[in-house]
């Protein structure tokens, strides 16, 4: 397992104690993307005052949740924007570093709060001990790592014409409904 370089949970708990996860989730769901968007907009407008303000704000927020690398990159950009002799290339480089880190941090937190589903391998025919004439009809299932979802039928209106009745026209409503359910791979 790779080492976590994004969040120092001990540092975050030091400031926020039991509310650390609440603020971390809020940062992931709201602040992270908004901060990234604000940074990019300020950079594109060449507004160094706004870029400095965004970096300063992100520096404080990331400090509280324990995102130390994010805090350091934000501080570097903030100081660079305050430096009147900083070149456009330097500001571009530091902004790109911070934006890339925010994208990586978002992916890390997305995985942290929405872990990959545990997929149980499907059972095979050989695993089943069913004594029935239908056993012969069972086919060996292939192991897959797919998620399947059952889709309900689309509602439709069945018009009954009571004036004509033919035996071959009779509809078994339950059978028709069951045929409409579909299994799709998500």
Image (cartoon, rainbow, N blue to C red):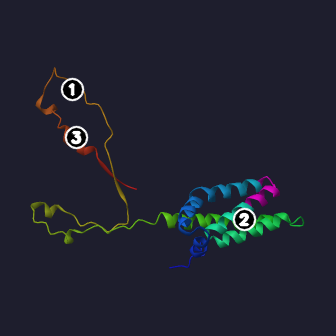
Q: Is residue 63 above or below residue 41?
A: below
Task: List x then y, in percent, for residue 90.
Answer: 81, 68
Task: List x then y, in percent, for residue 62.
Answer: 65, 66
Q: Residues within 10 Å of mark 2 (few under 14, many from 20)?
A: some
Say which residue appears at 16% left-offset and 31% top-offset: 169
Q: Badge 2 is on which residue?
A: 96
Q: On residue 176, which mark appears? A: 3
CA–CA distance in space, label 2 to label 3: 57 Å
Please, what secondary structure does the residue beneath circle 1 have? loop
- Mark with earlier residue (1, 3): 1
Q: Badge 1 is on which residue?
A: 160
In the picture, measured across the screen, residue 183 lies left or right of residue 33, that is left
Q: Residue furthest top?
A: 163
Q: On residue 32, which mark appears? A: none
Residue 79 in view in this figure: yes
Question: Of 128 and 105, which appears nearest the observer?
Answer: 105
Q: State which quadrant residue 68 falls in.
A: bottom right
Say which residue appears at 77% left-offset and 58% top-offset: 53
Asked whether the beta carbons under mark 1 and mark 2 sit within 8 Å of each other, the answer is: no
Task: List x then y, in percent, for residue 42.
Answer: 76, 54
The magenta segment is 43-55
Would you say residue 179 sits in the magenta stretch?
Answer: no
Question: Of 111 and 175, which appears nearest the observer?
Answer: 111
- Mark with earlier residue (2, 3): 2
């Amino acid at each position: 397992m790779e080492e976590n370089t994004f969040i120092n949970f001990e540092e975050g708990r030091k400031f926020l104690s039991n509310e650390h996860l609440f603020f971390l989730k809020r940062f992931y769901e709201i602040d992270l993307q908004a901060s990234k968007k604000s940074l990019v907009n300020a950079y594109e407008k060449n507004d160094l005052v706004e870029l400095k303000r965004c970096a300063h704000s992100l520096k404080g927020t990331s400090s509280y949740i324990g995102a130390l690398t994010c805090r350091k990159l934000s501080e570097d950009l903030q100081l660079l924007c305050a430096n009147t002799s900083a070149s456009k290339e330097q500001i571009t480089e530091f902004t790109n570093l911070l934006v890339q880190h925010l994208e990586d941090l978002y992916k890390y937190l997305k995985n942290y709060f929405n872990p990959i589903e545990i997929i149980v391998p499907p059972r095979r025919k050989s695993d089943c001990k069913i004594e029935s004439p239908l056993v012969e009809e069972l086919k060996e299932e292939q192991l897959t790592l797919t998620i399947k979802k059952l889709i309900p039928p689309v509602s439709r209106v069945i018009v009954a014409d009571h004036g004509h009745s033919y035996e071959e026209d009779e509809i078994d409503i339950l059978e028709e409904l069951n045929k409409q359910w579909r299994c799709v791979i998500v």
